[in-house]
Amino acid sequence: MPIFLLRFGELRYGNVVLTELKLLVTIDSGKLSAPLTAKYRGTPVKLALKADGAKGSLGIDASAANFDLGKLLADLDLSTMLNARADFGAKLNGQGKSLHAIAASLGGQTNLVIGRGTINSRAFAIVSDDLVNVLIPSGESGDTAKLVCAISRFDFTRGVGKASALALETDSLITTGSGTVDLGGERIDLLFKPKPKKASLVSLAFPVRLSGPLTAPTAGLDRTGVVTGVATAVGGAALTGGIGALLPLMSAGSDSITSGGDCGAAAAAAKESSGIAGTVGGAAEGAAKSIGDTLENIGKGIFGN
């Protein structure tokens, strides 16, 4: 049973720099296990890969808590329009002879919590001005909106991820979302419903649907699901058991975004929107992890970019 232990003081992929990297590779009867630990900008990152050559299967278990999401997106040359820290957790597995086949069979869950920060409207205006208005209306003139919290949980079955919890709170709105991401068909279909915090923003209370190919989705008003009346912010409402009731892969550590109190309103709104009830005892398994360059490569393989 071959075992390899690799250590690197620093590993670079473009502008992404991982430090204190440790990788333990074990191969036994065609099965590979490769847990990795490292730091990104001083934040611990964990990633465990498991593969079975006979079955053609691949599993990923990843997490990071309180990492600098804005800096990571900038380092990956994806966006410079977000300034916020986040927790991330993913536990996914698939089977197939290609990355696309693995993605099309994917099962598991991804969780993301983004804490307080700022976000620029141009990040969404690329897709649609309607999307700007239901997420960050103060950005319609190019301004930066204050981000209070964003949460996301997708449960994957056979390559289709269903949004079990999806919400974004800014200083103006709480917007909840529902829908699916189909990795096999490479399509997305999400519906966002804004809840204005101020009566003056009632004109923005129209649902927006984001749909189409993953590589080029479009967004527009969904007038069949018009929001009636002025919804108010959920305010201090909190879930029994905390945000862990919605995002069981997240960390409850004192240094994590998840453990803070800023996401109570977004979590309660997401719970109401998704119909999720009950709690998960404590916050289960492991803290969120940034998988940076590894996931970017997987994404390119799946979508051919």
Image (cartoon, rainbow, N blue to C red):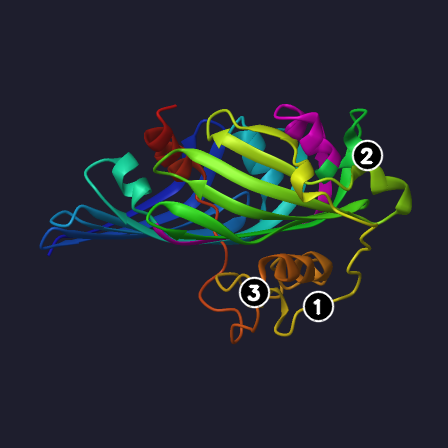
| Image quadrant assignment for residue 147 | top right
Give coordinates of residue 186: x percent, y percent. 40, 33
Mark 1 Cα-neighbour bin, 10 Å: few <14, some 14–19, many ≥20: some
Give coordinates of residue 286: x percent, y percent. 46, 63
Which amino acid, mark 1?
Answer: Ala
Quick one: label 3 or label 2, which is nearer the N terminus?
A: 2
Locate the C terminus by quadrant.
top left
Magenta-drawn segment: 107-133
In terms of secondary structure, where does tag 1 sit? loop
Give coordinates of residue 45: x percent, y percent. 46, 50
Residue drawn at 21 percent across, 42 percent down: 96
Residue to which mark 1 is pinned: 238
| Image quadrant assignment for residue 145 | top right
Tell which tag, 1 or 3, sits nearer the viewer: 3
Quick one: label 1 or label 3, which is nearer the N terminus?
A: 1
In terms of secondary structure, where does tag 3 sit? loop
Camera-nearest residue between 65 and 275: 275
Which amino acid, mark 3?
Answer: Ile
The answer to whether mark 1 and mark 3 are in CB contact below 8 A is: no
Residue drawn at 78 percent across, 31 percent down: 139
Res 113 seen here: no
Residue 298 drawn in magenta: no
Quick one: label 2 or label 1, which is nearer the N terminus?
A: 2
Camera-nearest residue between 119 and 237: 237
- Distance from Cα at disc 1 to Cα at disc 3: 14 Å
Residue to which mark 3 is pinned: 276
In the picture, measured across the screen, residue 87 lies left or right of residue 156, that is right
Res 90 seen here: yes
Give coordinates of residue 243: x percent, y percent. 61, 64
Q: Is residue 167 above or below residue 139?
A: below
Which amino acid, mark 2?
Answer: Ser
Residue drawn at 58 percent across, 30 percent down: 74
